[in-house]
Image (cartoon, rainbow, N blue to C red):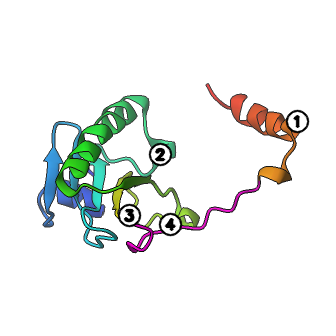
Amino acid sequence: MRHDDCLFCKIIDGELPSAKVYEDKYVYAFMDISQVTEGHTLVIPKKHTKNIYETDEETAKEFFGRIPKVASAIKKAFNPVGLNILNNNDILAGQTVYHLHLHLIPRYDEHDGFGFNWQMKRDDYSQEELNDLAKKISKEID
């Protein structure tokens, strides 16, 4: 199911070039042109879906089910000491292509060009407040 003005749909269809890593009936994996670190790979579902919020369960199952296979191949090929798996949804989170995708970013050392600031707020919430937050989410799950 293609979306005509989607960059990634055009890559899947061969209208735009890519350095293909893996392809099957459900997913397409290719090298990210930014190469934040060597081996930085994108994995996308072949079915167009804008983001994680709009992804049906079957597409998610097939899509996420392929991630260990591609990640393991990156590990064998480049021998990184770690791997970040990153997904951005909507503008504030950094999404720039509106087709669900995961970045598999091999990590080599603390100076390899990738990083983010994760501020721990462990002391900002009591157990009761955490329980309340959990209930808000739980009641919205179908």
Q: Earlier in the sequence, mark 1 or mark 2?
A: 2
Mark linked to residue 94: 4
Q: Earlier in the sequence, mark 1 or mark 3?
A: 3
**100 lies above or below 39:** above
**Which residue in the structure is indicated by mark 2?**
52
Task: Name the one closer to the observer, 10 or 69.
Answer: 69
Q: Residue 35, image x and y in percent?
A: 28, 70
> Which one is closest to the eye, mark 4 or mark 3?
4
Q: Earlier in the sequence, mark 1 or mark 4?
A: 4
Q: Horizontal placement of 86 versus 16: left or right?
A: right
Give the residue drawn at x 40%, y 59%: 98
Q: Please tell me how crowded label 2 is: few (under 14), some (14-19), or many (20+) other residues with Cα within 10 Å.
A: some
> Which one is closest to the eye, mark 1 or mark 4?
1
Give the residue drawn at x 30%, y 38%: 68
Are discs 1 and 3 less than 8 Å apart at CB? no
Q: Residue 42, image x and y in percent?
A: 29, 56
